[in-house]
Amino acid sequence: MTRLLGPVDTAIDLARAAPGLPEQALADALAQVAPQLAAHARTPGYHPYGLPELRAAVAERFTRRGLATLPEQILVTSGAQHALSLVLGLLGRPGDRVMVENPSYANALDAMRRARLRTVSVPVTDTGWDVEIVESTLRQTVPQLGYLIPDFHNPTGCLMPDDERARILRAAQRSGTWLIVDETLAELALDVPPPLPFASHGASGQVITVGSMSKTHWGGLRIGWLRAPAKLVTELAGQRVATDMGGSVIDQLLALELLERAGDLLPARLEQARVQRAALADALAEHIPQWTWRSPPGGLSLWVDLGEPIGSAFAEKALDHGVRIESGAYFATDPGLFEQRLRIPFTTSPDTLHEAVQRMAAALAQGLSPSSVDRRPHWVA
Ligand SMILES: Cc1ncc(COP(=O)(O)O)c(C=O)c1O
């Protein structure tokens, strides 16, 4: 117990790949929002589809990125995770199959388990997807749903090439699978041009695109969205009323302001991520040279190969040394996989990353106890 209360409070958090929002951007946006509130406060304030202005702005953003979109195709949600849960709740029945990447975003896998869906996994390796496996999985298992993170995949950082997107879209169309495409990280393009929306690569009638402001702006906004055929959006809005009636007007006004300034904010955020990625790489090379990784073209984390299957034991030990981190196993569809991996986010300052790596090196030097019971609370972003 003391262990949980002691180091957790002061530990450097490398479990969440989640950057903060610059103070000035927040102050400027809040100043713009305050005078708009009075007009909204005179209305009931329930917007199950999302604030109309924000829906329009998100639709416009898709259109600008190369995928013509109307506001009625957008549902504003409390983050990408909420969007995913709404879709799983509406389109998935217990026992239905869902095709997922392995590894994948841990909270998405958790949502699928809680919805009692059966996962069928397709591998994502350091070199990306094997489209033939994806195609044959769709053909042979005919899943009701598929969940993909094609843009700077969490946790591997891989970017799916355009031709593979087109092939997977065609295969999903043939199997009648609804594809949920999570574009939460799409704008975190560090070394390459930002990818086009997945749904722009072919017939998108059965594609639901999920997006978020959590990585481009701030997770604490709790603003995300989904893009789907308008009829499905109406059904999802019904699902949404049953859960929370709609999102906060204040949060959505703030999100709208921030979205309108995305062009000012994003370049600095990308530059910061590049600097932090380099700092993490340097610190690892200096203090733990036996660990290896491929530098991802975008995203917010390194998918590090530890050279031996020690991920969970290491994460346990790292907490004793003041670093909270998750083993690669936490991102696996099945127990026992990816124990040789660690996802290390580069979302904190270079100094903090350097300190974290030094602490991790010290943890490693002490040796690991393979059979210790994992008592850490698990929680990633
Ligand atoms: C791929 C992916 N999807 C969804 C989420 C959750 O996003 P949100 O904070 O918008 O719910 C994250 C956050 O880490 C993510 O990396």
Image (cartoon, rainbow, N blue to C red):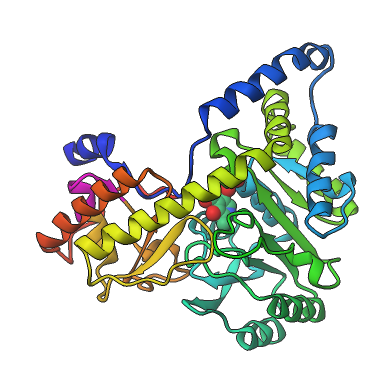
Give the residue displayed 22% in from the left and 62% down from the top: 286
Determine if residue 210 is in view.
yes
Residue 38 position (above or below residue 11): above
Q: Quadrant of residue 117?
A: bottom right
**Number of numbered discs visible in the structure rendering:** 0
Q: Is residue 331 left or right of residue 374?
A: right
State which quadrant residue 96 falls in. Answer: bottom right
Q: Which residues are magenta?
A: 317-324
Left or right of 89? Residue 38 is: right
Q: Quick check: is 126 in the magenta stretch?
A: no
Residue 167 percent across, percent down from the top left? 74, 81
Work out which quarter of the rendered image holds the N terminus and state it: top left
Q: Residue at x 60, y 34 (%)?
A: 221
Q: Is residue 381 visible?
A: no
Q: Residue at x 66, y 25 (%)?
A: 29
Q: Is residue 295 left or right of residue 281?
A: right
**Residue 63, x across and y down, in percent:** 84, 53
Task: Work out whether residue 275 or residue 182 is closer to the camera in this orientation and state it.
Answer: 275
Look at 36% across and 49% down and name the residue there.
14
The image shows residue 62 at horizontal and vertical percentages of 79, 52
Q: Is residue 212 above or below residue 178?
A: above
| Vertical position of residue 31 compared to residue 132: above or below | above
Pick the residue in front: 54 or 117: 54
Name above or below for residue 300 compared with residue 134.
above
Return the residue nearer the eye: 132 or 92.
132
Q: Which x, y percent locates residue 297?
A: 53, 66
